[in-house]
């Protein structure tokens, strides 16, 4: 279901997924000053036609009655797809890829941000986004994802 949501226009699942995320978030949603999705580069958004993290963030914002700012973070560096990259390669791939939209910087000052993404794999993207938010003045950054990729356990 999550892969269909991410790659196959299964966008109608966003409200249901957001309900799951709200339950998992506990107090994180209620303590957030604002919700920010992980952005897609403009060309990836053009080809995909939607940002799945933004859909989740919007649905969460409605549930938690929180302000969602879909364009607070910009992915201005076009990065390659990370599906085939190692964790170290992923970190290098997204290093310096994000910046804060200047018009939103005042709102970000001392804010507690809930950063939303669909899938956590290595944490490289969320780490890069979090560093960007902190550098721009965020007081705290909490992360909420729909799913997490786990490494297989080594054989016994």
Image (cartoon, grey):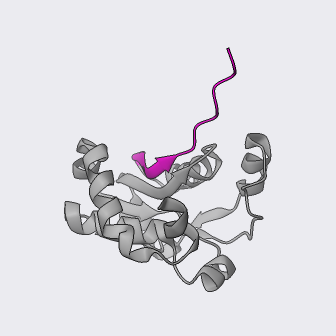
The one of 122 and 102 positioned closer to us in this rendering? 122
Q: Residue at x 44, y 55 (%)?
A: 115
Q: Is residue 57 above or below residue 84?
A: below
For the C terminus, give its image quadrant.
Answer: top right
Q: Residue furthest top?
A: 156
Number of marks in the rendered image:
0
Is residue 69 visible to us here? no
The one of 95 and 152 positioned closer to us in this rendering? 152
Q: Residue at x 69, y 62 (%)?
A: 97
Q: Residue 140 magenta-drawn?
A: yes
> From the viewer's perspective, is 110 left or right of 71?
left
The one of 139 and 89 positioned closer to us in this rendering? 89
Is residue 110 visible to us here? yes
Q: Residue at x 58, y 37 (%)?
A: 150
Q: Residue 122 magenta-drawn?
A: no
The one of 13 and 86 positioned closer to us in this rendering? 13
> From the viewer's perspective, is 67 left or right of 91?
left
Q: Residue furthest front?
A: 156
Q: Position of residue 138 (x, y in %)?
A: 43, 52
Q: Tell me where the magenta segment starts and ends, as one range.
A: 139-156
Q: Position of residue 58 (x, y in %)?
A: 34, 71
Where, by quadrant of the figure, is residue 3 drawn? bottom right
> From the viewer's perspective, is 40 left or right of 63?
right
């Amino acid at each position: 279901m999550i892969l269909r949501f991410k790659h196959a226009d299964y966008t109608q699942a966003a409200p249901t997924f957001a309900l799951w995320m709200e339950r998992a978030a506990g107090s994180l949603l209620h303590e957030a000053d604002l919700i920010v999705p992980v952005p897609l580069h403009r060309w990836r958004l053009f080809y995909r036609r939607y940002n799945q993290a933004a859909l989740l963030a919007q649905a969460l914002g409605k549930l938690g009655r929180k302000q969602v700012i879909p364009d607070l973070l910009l992915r201005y560096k076009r990065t390659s797809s990370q599906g085939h990259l190692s964790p170290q390669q992923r970190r290098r791939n997204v290093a310096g890829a994000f910046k804060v939209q200047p018009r939103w910087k005042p709102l970000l000052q001392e804010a507690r941000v809930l950063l939303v993404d669909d899938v956590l794999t290595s944490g490289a993207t969320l780490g890069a986004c979090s560093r960007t938010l902190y550098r721009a003045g965020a007081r705290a950054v909490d992360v909420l994802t729909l799913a997490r990729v786990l490494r297989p356990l080594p054989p016994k």
